[in-house]
Amino acid sequence: MRKHRSLALVCVALATCAAQSQTGMLRVTDAWIRAAPPGAMVLAGYMTVENSSPEDIKLTAAESPQFGMIELHRSVIEDDAARMRKQPYFLVPARGKLVLEPNGRHLMMMMPNVPLQSGDNVTVVLTLDNGASLEVNAPLRSVR
Ligand SMILES: [Cu+2]
C-alpha cells in the first residue's frame, strides 16, 4: 500500500497525468458536472468510483482549481422536502463502487472562479484516506 501511495502522489505532482482517472485500485468512470445558468455559484458533480481492492477506501475530500470549495453532499428527503446533508466522507466499499448521481450523493462544487459552460472540462482532485490522490476530468454538460 505504501508503494502505491507514493506512486499516486508522484503522478499528481508531475501533472503529467491530466487524463488519469485511475490510481491503484480505484477507477473513475462517468464523471460529469451538471451545467448551471451563468452566474451560478454552486454546481453538482457526479461520477462512479470503482474499488477493485479487498479494502474499503474513503473519499475524504475533493478540490478543483476551478472552484473555491467542494463539499461532499448527500440528498435526502425530510418532511417531504429535498435537502442536502454534508458528509464527512464517501465510502468506496471493497470490491464495490460508490455512485454519485442526481438525487443522491454528489460533489457540491462552490464558488467557481472562472465562467464555465457546457463542454468545458473541470479538473477534480479526490483525496483518499489511504493518502493517495486521484485526479479526474469531468466535462460540464446539462444532462448525463
Ligand atoms: Cu449538495
Image (cartoon, rainbow, N blue to C red):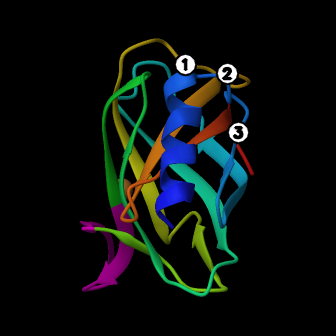
Residue 120, numbered label: 2
Identify the residue position indicated by label 1 in the image: 116
Within 10 Å of disc 2 (Cα), the crowding (few <14, some 14-19, many 20+) is: some
- Whether label 2 touches label 1, CB < 8 Å: yes
- Looking at the image, is mark 2 or mark 3 earlier in the sequence? 3
Q: Which residue does the image show at 73% across and 32% down from the upper left?
A: 19
Report x, y in % for residue 135: 57, 40
Q: How far is mark 1 from mark 3, CA to CA?
A: 22 Å
Q: Indicate if the residue with disc 2 has its beta carbon within 8 Å of ligand 1.
A: no
The range drawn in magenta is 73-88
Name the amino acid, label 2: Asp
Within 10 Å of disc 1 (Cα), the crowding (few <14, some 14-19, many 20+) is: some
Q: Secondary structure at mark 1?
A: loop
Q: Which residue does the image show at 51% across and 67% down from the upper left?
A: 1
Name the amino acid, label 3: Gln
Majority SS type along the magenta span: strand
Report x, y in % for residue 134: 54, 47
Q: Is residue 45 left or right of residue 127?
A: right
Report x, y in % for residue 114: 44, 12
Viewer-proximal residue among 31 and 1: 1
Q: Is residue 83 left or right of residue 121?
A: left
Q: Which residue does the image show at 65% across and 35% down from the upper left?
A: 137
**Considering only vertical position in the picture, is 25 above or below 34?**
below
Q: Indicate if the residue with disc 3 has its beta carbon within 8 Å of ligand 1.
A: no
Within 10 Å of disc 3 (Cα), the crowding (few <14, some 14-19, many 20+) is: some
Report x, y in % for residue 119: 74, 24
Q: Secondary structure at mark 2?
A: loop
Identify the residue position indicated by label 3 in the image: 20
Verify whether residue 85 appears in magenta: yes
Q: Secondary structure at mark 3?
A: loop
